[in-house]
Image: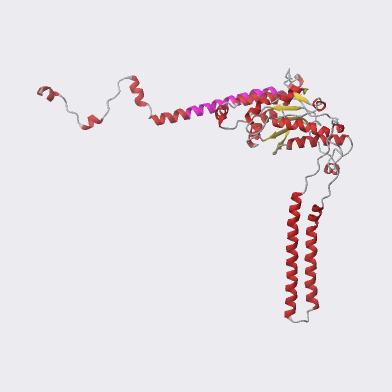
Amino acid sequence: MENSTEARPKLTPDAAAKPALPTTLSGKLRAKLPSRGWMIFWTTFGTIGGLVVRDHYLTVDAKKRVADKVDTLAKQSCGVQDMPRKVTVYITAPPGDGIHKTRHYFKAFVKPVFDAAALDYEVKEGLVEGQIQRMVAADVRKKRRVAAGKISALSEAEQAAPVVPMKSVSDGIVVLGRIALAEVLQGYNDGCLQSLDDPEPVVVAEKLEEVSIKDEAASLATEATGSVETTTLDKSEDTPTSTEAAVAAAAAELTAAAAEAETKSKEGEKKAEEAPAPIPIPQDEAYFSVPPSGLEPVGYIPFKNLTGFRNFHKKIFALFNSYDCVEYAGASVMKVAFAETKDFEKDDLETGRDEEPLFKKYRGPVEINMLDRVREQVKLYVTPENIPELKKDEEVVLEEQQ
């Protein structure tokens, strides 16, 4: 036993601390891998980066496919006196969120298709509920009044100008989301039923008092100033003590007049705030009429805004799959670009109902109250059966220009 113990080699402290080299393949690979923390970091970074790059590539490819379909419209020849086709886009804030979401959706998924189709557009925003409805109703009523000869089609500046500039006229309406769609259709209904005569102005005594406050204050100040000058001139021969007393009395009178005028001004502001709102324009079926140009066709673009913690997983999925929105929204924008329409039927009033579950926490269902006689005058953009192609002579002209 003693001999066997002595035969064992004694390990030095350095040799005992040094680990043995791996001999297997898996051991060699494991030895070259970074630490556990670095592995987690690079895996997370690589996964997120790969998803972002993938989504960017697919989004660019989807935009190119949609743009190629409407490219034929941009390459069509246009006359010298012709203006590009124009549409009016109405957007509003989704319930429970800001209007910046709608702006981003329009800029990212709708505007590129309009640009590819050489389609002019004007964006109008409804910052409060009912604002789009009032804008559409006022526009329809204005066209009816122009047709009836109540007002001129040209503004005062255009009438005074020696040459009237050319401008494109909107021949279609585009809405983002069901809420904007409901307000536009409701605006059509109100605009066709409103009276062509303006309501009589209401004279409110409080408003007249508010206007005359400043004049009264100015007259009081003038009288006080005049009395000072008169006193100074008339009593120039008196002692300095009497002159100073007169000036002090006039200054006190002026201060009192200014304080009284300020008090009346505040009272006038309160009365103005409490004044009743302007009388709305009378509206009845007896006033029904449609502009000679008709009501502009409506193009609906779905807009589903995800809010709340319950939709967090959907937000994450949409963040890395935005190319779906390009195809989703692009198909609806193509309907507007090719301008093929159909009659607006009763079933079309239910368009966009699938958006309501996303904002039921903030508001109830969106109902559209529209008369049948008004609905029959509205057209809805639909997908064209055959996409037009360039003619041979137009292709030759384009090649010569290039």
Foreground of the two, 171 or 230: 230
Which image quarter holds the C terminus? top right
Q: What colouring style does the render use?
A: secondary structure
Residue 65 belongs to the span the image colors magenta: yes
Which image quarter holds the N terminus? top left
Q: Which residues are magenta?
A: 45-71
Tell me what residue is drawn at x 15 percent, y 24 percent: 8
Q: Is residue 248 visible?
A: yes
Foreground of the two, 189 or 393: 189
Q: Quadrant of residue 306?
A: top right
54 on left or right of 342: left
Principal secondary structure, stretch drawn in magenta: helix
- Estimate the x, y position of residue 12 in percent, counting from the top left: 20, 31
The residue at the far top in this view is: 385
350 on left or right of 292: left
The residue at the far left in this view is: 2
Q: Quadrant of residue 248?
A: bottom right
- Estimate the x, y position of residue 115 in percent, counting from the top left: 69, 30
- Estimate the x, y position of residue 28 in percent, counting from the top left: 34, 23
Foreground of the two, 98 or 361: 361
- Estimate the x, y position of residue 338 in percent, counting from the top left: 74, 24
Tell me what residue is drawn at x 77 percent, y 81 percent: 238
Foreground of the two, 398 or 196: 196
The residue at the far right in this view is: 149
Q: Is residue 340 visible?
A: no
Residue 106 belongs to the span the image colors magenta: no
Q: Quadrant of residue 318?
A: top right
